[in-house]
Structure formats: structure tokens, C-alpha cells
Amino acid sequence: MKLLTTKPNNNLRQEFYTKNQLLRSSFTEISPQDYLSFVFSNKRDHDELVVVFGEERDGKTVKQRGTVTRVRFGEIWSLAWCQNAYIPYCDFKNNYYHSKTLESVRGFVNDCDGVTSIKLVKILRYLWNFLPAEPTHIVNSGKGLHFVYLLSTPIKVKGLRWTLDSLNKAIQDTFSQLIEIDKHPIVHPYRFPGFQTKINTTASVFQVRQPYSLEQLARYFKIQTMPEKTNKKHSTRAEVHVLPNGRRAFFEWVLRKLFKNPPIPGRRHNSFFALGIIAYKCKREVPYDEALETIPMVYEDMSDRNLHLGFTMDEAYKAFLKGYKAKYVKASWKYLCDLLAWDYRPNKRNKRTRQEHLWYLQKIRKIQKEEKELQIKRLLELGYSKTQIAEILGMSRRNLYKTYGYLLKT
């Protein structure tokens, strides 16, 4: 009986070492310590890192439930013996592990299970040339492989959540057309090189090429990083400002309702369409990227409450973008309430005085301008031209010079 139980593990370990030899013949193997330091280059020994421990089972019996802990970066290798320790390629606010607290992203991962040495040869020989961009690293994680796309610098999620989610989906969809993979969200944790695998080997890593910038990956995988362009004929000031409900108060009220009292089944898809209309009406007070960030929060909140949504996150984005068009701008708030089966009583300033309300609007505009200034500075440092920067920001080159010309003269 012992031979029957140990022989499969021996075969899997032999496959693991064969895959290492194949990868070593084509790429450069790097040490796990160098890889970890490269991924988390701005971490110091006293900084904490989120580590997720997976569930341990003995047949159908759960020996240990999954847990999340924080470990000092300098002490991370004390957990290398664990077979169920995983690390996400991202950072979180106050190291609180949740999709809503996601702060920055460091890379995208394609998780391929059950990759044998024969399958690896086919991937490297035939499928490699069909990829829009090669992965930066390949991790031999035991039975499978991780194809990693590392970013040259950690990307802050604020204002880019839709772009990052779309890019993660596009990368995984591209791989799924070629080989079978397990699709995961950005916050999903993975086994890191140097940690023990389930077949009692140590995960290894190989470098394929240098990391990408976010703009490079978005271009290779054809992700639009700027707001959807609207028809100029229907986007005049008068059409927006004449509406009685083009105010941030109505937008925030809809968000509260979506979180606390989501629409009845059959109308939840309409809720994201309505949110797109409302965001368009309030676009001078609610930044486009800020409105996009609310979609995954609302969607995941419904999922966490075990509500049967009946549609995917991608469909939610499409519904929002469909509503974010000029031709729906004349929809009244009464029509939207009927669409969602809600009752709304408009409040002009959300209990603020006129002076407080004007100060509030000035603050919002200032924050929005500061965010764009930081983005322009970052793109200039990366060597982007003025035309490319204008396209990424979703504005004309003329407006870019008019508004942010003082940044472009340097």
C-alpha cells in the first residue's frame, strides 16, 4: 500500500524537476529572495506583508480553516516550509485583505494547473508566439505553472480600478484561448517561489523579460485607458445643467440604496445602467474614474450577501458604459426611480449651506485636478509624448496645453 501512495508523488516530483530543466534551458533562473525583493522593492524588513493561509483538508474533514495574517517582510521566509501559504501581488490599505481595500497592484498572474513537461514543451514551442506580450516571469509552483506579468512600478488603484480589472480579464482571456487556466481576480494570492509545494518540492522562478508599464500592457492587450468618448452634439453644457437631478447628492443616494437595499431580481442589471446615466448627469461633480470604482464595490457587496445577480462583472461594466452616453441624459430621476422601484425625494445641497456647498465643490475640483497632475508627471517621466498623454487622459491636445501647459514646459 505504501508503494501505491508514494509512487504518484514521485512521478509528480520528477515532472517538477523536468519542467525546471526545460525552463532553465530557455530562461534565466533567479533566486526566490531576489524575486520577492524585486516584486516588493519598496518594502523594508519592518514593513508588514499580507499572507493568506489556505484551507487544509484530510479527505472531507477540514483540519484548518483559511486565515489571513500580517508578517514582517524580513521574517517572511520563516513560513517557507508551509504548503498552504500564499501571497497576493498587491498592497492593501492598513494591510486589511479585501477587494474594497485594494490600494496598489504589482502584477497580473495566470494560474495554470496540471501542466506536465510535455504540455510545457507545446506551450513554449507553439503557443508562445500567439501571445500579444510575453510574461515577465514563469513560476514552477508544483503541479502547475504561474505566468506572471510584473509591473515596473506599483500602480495605485484609485482612478484606475476599471482599467486594472479589464486588463486582468483580458490577459486571462488571452491565455484561456490557448491553454486551460483558473481565472482569478487581482487580489487572489499565489504560492511564491521558495515556498514548499503540495508535492514536497520548492517552487522556483525564471525570468523571461523585464517588467512592463501599465500603458504598455494596456496597449498590447488592447485595453482602453481613457473614458468613452461621447457625441459632441449631445454633450453641451445646457443639456446637462438644465436637468434638476444632475447633482452629486442624487448619485450618492443611489449608491447608498444599491449597498443597503439592492433592486429586486430582474432589475439589478438595470441598476448599473441607471448608475451610468446618473454618473453622466453628475459628471461635473463626480469624476468619471470615481464613478467607475463604485461598480466592483456594489457588485461584490451584492455577491457577499449571497444575492443571485444573474450577470457578470463584465456585463455590469457594459451596462454602466451604455448608460454613460449623451442620448440617455434626458432620462428624469422619476424614470430612474421607476426603473429601480425606489422612492426618492431630492435634496438640493444634502443639508449643506450655500457657502459650505460651494466650498465642497471647490475641494472636489481641486482633488480631481491634483490627481490628473500626478498622472501627467508620471507619464512624462515614462517618456510619453504630449499627444499620447492627451489620449490617455481623454482630452484633446489643445485642452491639455490650455489646462496643464505649465507641466509640459519642463
Image (cartoon, grey):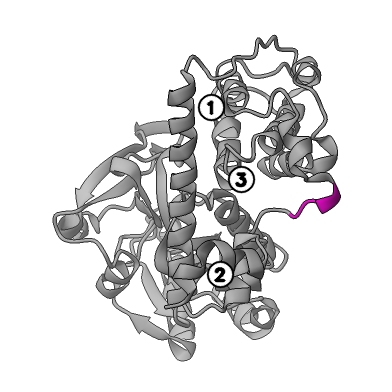
Sequence-wise, the earlier of marks 2 and 3 is 2
Query: Which residue is rendered at x = 43% and y = 39% of the image?
Result: 363
| The one of 163 and 305 positioned closer to us in this rendering | 163
Residue at which label 1 appears: 304
Disc 3 and disc 1: Cα gap in Å? 25 Å
Please name the amino acid that badge 1 sits on. Answer: Asp
**Above or below 70: residue 110:** below
Camera-nearest label, 1 or 2 = 2
Main SS class of the magenta portion in the image: loop
Magenta stretch? 229-233
Residue at which label 2 appears: 215
Please name the amino acid that badge 2 sits on. Answer: Glu
Q: Quadrant of the C terminus?
A: bottom left
Q: Can residue 276 be seen in the rendering of this structure?
A: yes
Residue 138 in the image: state x and y as whole percent: 47, 73
Residue at which label 3 appears: 288
Classify mark 2: residues with Cα within 10 Å, few (<14), some (14-19) or many (20+).
some
Query: Which residue is rendered at x = 69% and y = 24% of the image?
Result: 245
Sequence-wise, the earlier of marks 1 and 2 is 2
